[in-house]
Image (cartoon, rainbow, N blue to C red):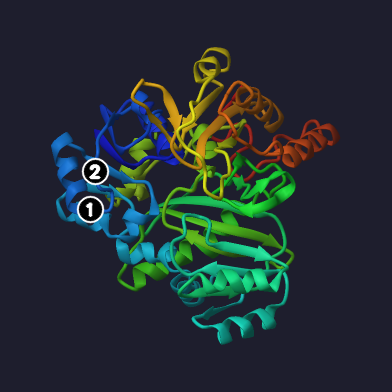
Amino acid sequence: MKVLVIGGGAREHALCRSLSLDPDVTALHCAPGNAGIAEVATLHQVDVLDGDAVAALAAEVGAGLVVVGPEAPLVAGVADTVRAHGVAVFGPSAEAARLEGSKAFAKEVMAAAGVPTARSYVCVDDAEVDAALDAFGPPYVVKDDGLAAGKGVVVTDDVEAARAHARQCASVVIEEFLDGPEVSLFAVTDGEHVVPLQPAQDFKRAHDGDEGPNTGGMGAYSPLPWADPKLVDEIEQTVLQPTVDELRRRGTPFSGLLYAGLAITSRGVRVIEFNARFGDPETQAVLARLRTPLGGLLHASATGTLAGFPPLRWHDGAAVTVVVAAHAYPGTPRTGDPVEGLDEVLAEDGPKAYVLHAGTRRDADGRTVSAGGRVLSVTATGADLAKARARAYAAVARVRLDGSHHRTDIAEWAAADAAERAAAEPDSGTGGPAGTGPGVGTAPLR
């Protein structure tokens, strides 16, 4: 099978890396890609929002599967156009992708499906915004109704900051604040059957201790040793399957990757948001643990054959991803700075730690330089979170990018908590989510 991946961030690099390790993937192409993806795939230039151009490229390279990574092409209907040309596509239709493209639409679907979520108001003018803010009180949660590259949400105790964000948006969703830890859970679906992956947790704030502005994500880890072993099953039954069933009932089946962002509150699981594609940086950590070849899984989704797909197999260790961001990110990041130390990571840490490129390109001299806000995702695996975390930060220390910054506390609490649990109950197993314990389709990460 020849595969064409659309996109050019660290998520797409993670997808391409996993696809390149699939023995059934005979050729791998990516458009537009980046400096790192160029090492595992043939790069092409294409307007990713032009479905006809993407379909023409798929025909040119003989792709049997097109994987659409980012949300903007999905909401623009690129998957629909490529499917109309007879090519299998991993990614939902434009109608189904409204689940991410409009938070108001997602709330409507959840209400119809009986999916637990935060109480909310959709507001289009200042009077409605003020009424909603008064109704909920601080902390205020204000979300741009449309796409905002993962940065359209403001959570603040400052009512003026909440109002200011709302004024920047044509339509906003204002909702109650949800207490408790957040969890990201991906599920591959063909519009009828749902196959959950393993959960992850990401870190949205720019600085240590969850300080600073929201970003697209500064790091992630998987699995979640503190989570209830039945959590994945619960989310599948109360969130994922009902949502897929509701969209199919509406005549707009969702085929592709359904991403549920969740809060584990004192009242139970609540949906924070849905995305219509793999999340970044959680994908980097989750795919690092997946043993099942990725190409076959995505093709089964695209061709409606998930019902007969074998159970997923996972490594029973852990993975940690740390994002290296450019100077001034998430404001106006500086670009064009040389990225150094990548060969050292490969030589000293590979294959247990490796670098996935996000915002990079090659300059006229062939050097890798920064080309975006989030520049790299340094990912490492290990037998447990502590080992994976230590390897990730050792690799980060080898990377040199002038003015860059990264969080130093990714997975810190979870690793310490897991170590305490292991010390207290040395024979209790991993304590991970359902399906991650020893002997359940797993192999160790050392």
* Residue 421 percent location from the top left of the image: 80, 38
Residue drawn at x 41%, y 34% as measured from the top left: 13
Three-letter amino acid code at the position of disc 2: Val
The kind of secondary structure element at disc 1 is: loop
Residue drawn at x 62%, y 30% as measured from the top left: 317
Crowding around mark 1 (Cα neighbors within 10 Å: few <14, some 14 to 19, many 20+) is some
* Residue 146 percent location from the top left of the image: 44, 66
Three-letter amino acid code at the position of disc 1: Asp
Crowding around mark 2 (Cα neighbors within 10 Å: few <14, some 14 to 19, many 20+) is some
To which quarter of the image does residue 200 belong?
Answer: top right
Instruction: From the image, tell me which residue sits under label 2.
Output: 46
Residue drawn at x 65%, y 55% as measured from the top left: 182
Left or right for 389, reference 6: right
Left or right for 445, reference 296: right
Say if residue 404 shows up in the picture: yes
Left or right for 193, reference 340: left
* Residue 78 percent location from the top left of the image: 26, 55
Nearer-the-camera pick, 231 or 71: 71
Question: Please, is residue 363 above or below residue 48 in the view?
Answer: above
Question: Please, is residue 430 above or below residue 240 in the view?
Answer: above
To which quarter of the image does residue 432 belong?
Answer: top right
To which quarter of the image does residue 352 belong?
Answer: top right
Residue drawn at x 42%, y 65% as measured from the top left: 99
Instruction: From the image, tell me which residue sits under label 1.
Output: 50
Q: Quadrant of the N terminus?
A: top left
Disc 1 + disc 2, Cβ < 8 Å: yes
Residue extending farthest top? 347
The kind of secondary structure element at disc 2 is: loop
**Which mark identifies residue 35?**
none
* Residue 180 percent location from the top left of the image: 72, 59
